[in-house]
Image (cartoon, rainbow, N blue to C red):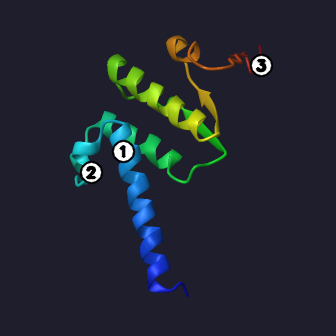
Amino acid sequence: MLPQLIRDRTHAQANERATALLTALGLGHRLTHRPSQLSGGEQQRVAVARALANQPALVLADEPTGNLDEATADVVLAEFLRLVRGEGSAALVATHNERMALKMDRVVRLHEGRLA
């Protein structure tokens, strides 16, 4: 069993990381709200933060800005890419959004079940 000090430090670090991610994604003012109190777009941003919380080596994202209006999607995507790149992670993003695809480092298209 972990000593109390280590558990508290780990919990505090997790809270700090979550707060930083949510704030970066424009949700700093909603930190104390329950999921049911968030809009669909805000819930989508929480999902992005959750995907990045443990600093994974690879993030798999299927339409990560799918429920967002265009302006918010641009902000969230920019922050998502900044965080992924800044932490040395890689992201595989599936999207139908051509504007989003153009912002990626590399684009691979799937046509009739084959990579094109």
User: Where is residue 102 drawn, in percent x and y?
Assistant: 58, 12
Question: Depth check: 69 or 72 in front?
Answer: 72
User: Where is residue 15 drawn, in percent x and y?
Assistant: 38, 60
Q: Which residue is mark 3?
A: 115
User: How much space separates mark 1 and mark 2, taking CA atoms?
Assistant: 8 Å
Residue appearing at x 29%, y 41% in the figure: 27
The crowd level at tag 1 (other Cα within 10 Å; few <14, some 14-19, many 20+) is many
Q: Which residue is mark 1?
A: 22
User: Foreground mark, 1 or 3?
Assistant: 1
Q: Amino acid at mark 2?
A: Leu
User: How much space separates mark 1 and mark 3, taking CA atoms?
Assistant: 35 Å
Q: Pointers 3 and 2 in contact (CB under 8 A)?
A: no
Of label 3 and label 2, which has the lower sequence position?
2
Work out which quarter of the rendered image holds the C terminus and state it: top right
Question: Depth check: 68 or 88 in front?
Answer: 88
* Rendered image quadrant of residue 66: top left
Q: Amino acid at mark 3?
A: Leu
The crowd level at tag 3 (other Cα within 10 Å; few <14, some 14-19, many 20+) is few
Of label 1 and label 3, which has the lower sequence position?
1
